[in-house]
Amino acid sequence: MAFNDMIIDAFRAGDGTVREPVDFGRNLGLLHIPRKDGTVALTPLFALQQDGAWFVVASAAGSPRHPAWTFGLRRTDEIDLEVAGDLGEPIRMVRVAVAEIEGDERDRMWAEFKRQGSSFAGYEATAEGREFPIFRLTPVEG
């Protein structure tokens, strides 16, 4: 089974809590990202919730190249996002608007990612100077 599939299965089986193969706790989001061919890629990512939105970073574990899903998010205005509810509540699907953040907001969120997960700081050393895109996912009303 592919690594992402193991994480997706753990997320759904654990009602939004993932401890293996990586400890995401309840900070995982499953992004439903449209591909050029019309299919949807399901991408599990560490998702920081702040100010009514979720933030995800295209770190690719410190690769010098952006992950393929980055370009899918840049091509769309909205996606579906599966997130854990409060403890004891089921996973829910949320329609979110997608916006790539830049400047001070991006820098502030990158610092928060590094504070929340120590591996993010290590990614800078292997990314060969690549700045990691960060996306804000804001619930769509209606």
Image (cartoon, rainbow, N blue to C red):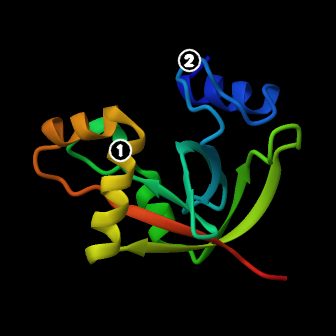
Q: CA distance from mark 2 to mark 1?
A: 21 Å
Q: Earlier in the sequence, mark 2 or mark 1?
A: 2
State if disc 1 and disc 2 touch (CB < 8 Å): no
- Residue 133, above or below 26: below
In the rendered structure, which amino acid carries the disc numbered 1? Answer: Arg
- Residue 11, above or below 138: above
Q: Where is residue 80 shown, x and y percent of the image?
A: 71, 61
Point out which mark residue 115 bears.
Answer: 1
Q: Where is residue 52 shown, x and y percent of the image?
A: 64, 69
Point out which mark residue 91 bears.
Answer: none
Determine the residue positioned at 72% across, 49% down.
Answer: 83
Q: Where is residue 95 shown, x and y percent of the image?
A: 74, 68
Q: Where is residue 127 shown, x and y percent of the image?
A: 18, 43
Name the image quarter holding residue 19.
top right
Q: Nearer the viewer, residue 122 or 36?
A: 122
Residue 8, visible in the rendered structure: yes
Where disc 1 sits, the SS reads helix
Determine the residue positioned at 42% across, 72% down.
Answer: 100
Residue 102, visible in the rendered structure: no
Apparent side of residue 33 relative to residue 92 in the rendered image (left or right) = left
Determine the residue positioned at 11% across, 44% down.
Answer: 128
Image quadrant holding the C terminus, namely bottom right
Instruction: Looking at this view, name the residue that lies furthest to the right.
Output: 89
Image quadrant holding the N terminus, namely top right
Apparent side of residue 59 relative to residue 33 in the rendered image (left or right) = left
Determine the residue positioned at 30% across, 54% down.
Answer: 111
To which residue does mark 2 refer?
21
